[in-house]
Image (spheres, rainbow, N blue to C red):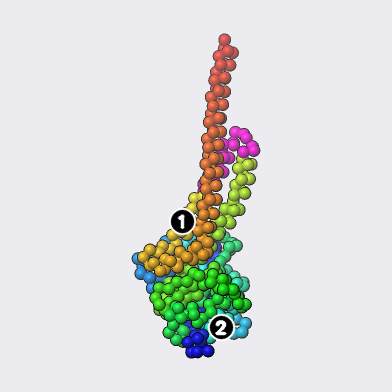
Amino acid sequence: MTEHAVTPRVEHGHILALRLFDIAYAIDLAAAEQLWAKHAEGRTSRARLTATPPKAVAFGEPPLAVALDAITLDLGVEQIEAVVTARLYDFGTVSLALRVPARDMAWTDFTARLNAVGEVARSTFWEPILEQLRHILRAALIKPTPSAVSEDYLIGNVQAFDSRLSAADILARVDLVPLLTGETRPLSETARAEVLRQRFSYYTDDLVVLTWDRAFIVEPRGDNDVADVLEVANAQLLQMRYYDELLDDELPRMYDLVEAARSRWNLSAARRYANLARTLTTLVAEVTELTEKVDNALQVTEDVYLARVYATALELFRVPNFVRAVDRKLSIIRDTYTALYDDASSLRSTLMEAAVIALIVMEIVLALLRH
């Protein structure tokens, strides 16, 4: 094997495991910042992208980042010190991040460490951390929810190989497929091409390769903008999945309530229709408000490269599909409460007409009795 064909070593990098949970209808970030400073005596910060000019991107409401205690991670074949952080989003999501260093490692060892971290990240490792956050930030959580929905994402980040490589050199000399898939058996050429299809470079020496649940990033300048953008995309995916499941549960309940209201016709039917319509209106308003917050979580404008990575991640994670599903279900609920309001108005009109007729009949009867 020639020197050029030797697989390079990872000189400096890290592995980032993300786990995102929906913990509340919304989070009061200002209150959360005060609570964390008071109870945990921890450092907090509002997120911004490190290498991107502020005018090129805009957070709807910058998430709150908090530092947690470092831990010793047992990866089976080794134990290693890791940094844990959390990021809170105002629309009710918390993103927990486990950052494991990687220095002076053969590529196969880097891949093995990433897969081992991925195994730990899919376990119950996060539960005590999440409960600690819930306990400290309880007063800042608006309508807390059980974390039935979660997302995870795994990122391998290399800042430097042991030799200077271009993006083309990396793709030619490093087998990224085992890292991006977790597979140990060789894949077909078609499958390999599909795994490596979503890749981006801005400079000659940087590289981003995206898949559904993993990414590989080479960033010699050491900024975390791409990883931060991928986290926001995962947060949006999580929330849209949550709203989709919420509305899936709500629609059958709505149909049952409407059927029950229509099956009992009496003088209070109009009031029942109106009350049910108001309940559905409130649900639509709440979900619409939060989906708008999620949609506006991050706006990438002038940074074309970051915008491409972000848009591709959203498509890859199928966020637009969930958005359309949520919009369709909200439309069904809107149509339903519009029909309920119409029914309530129709019933009121019928009752008013009946009352007027009854009064006329009564006047006639009284007139006949007087004569």
Report crowding for label 1: few under 14, some 14 to 19, many 20 or more residues within 10 A (C-alpha). few
The amino acid at mark 2 is Thr
Q: Main secondary structure of the magenta part?
A: helix
Q: Quadrant of the C terminus?
A: top right
Disc number placed over residue 292 in the picture, else none: 1
- Is 3 colored magenta in this rendering? no
Q: Nearer the viewer, residue 210 or 133?
A: 210
Residue 172 in the image, given as x and y percentages of width and height: 49, 80
The amino acid at mark 1 is Glu
Which quadrant of the structure image shows residue 113? bottom right
Q: Nearer the viewer, residue 320 or 351?
A: 320
- Is 268 colored magenta in this rendering? yes
Residue 248 in the image, given as x and y percentages of width and height: 59, 53
Image position of 139 with respect to 335: above or below: below
Disc number placed over residue 108 in the picture, else none: 2
Foreground mark, 2 or 1, reads 2
Image position of 106 with respect to 23: above or below: below
Tell me the SS state at disc 1: helix
Report crowding for label 2: few under 14, some 14 to 19, many 20 or more residues within 10 A (C-alpha). some
Residue at coordinates 60% horizontally, 72% vertically from top-left?
Answer: 122
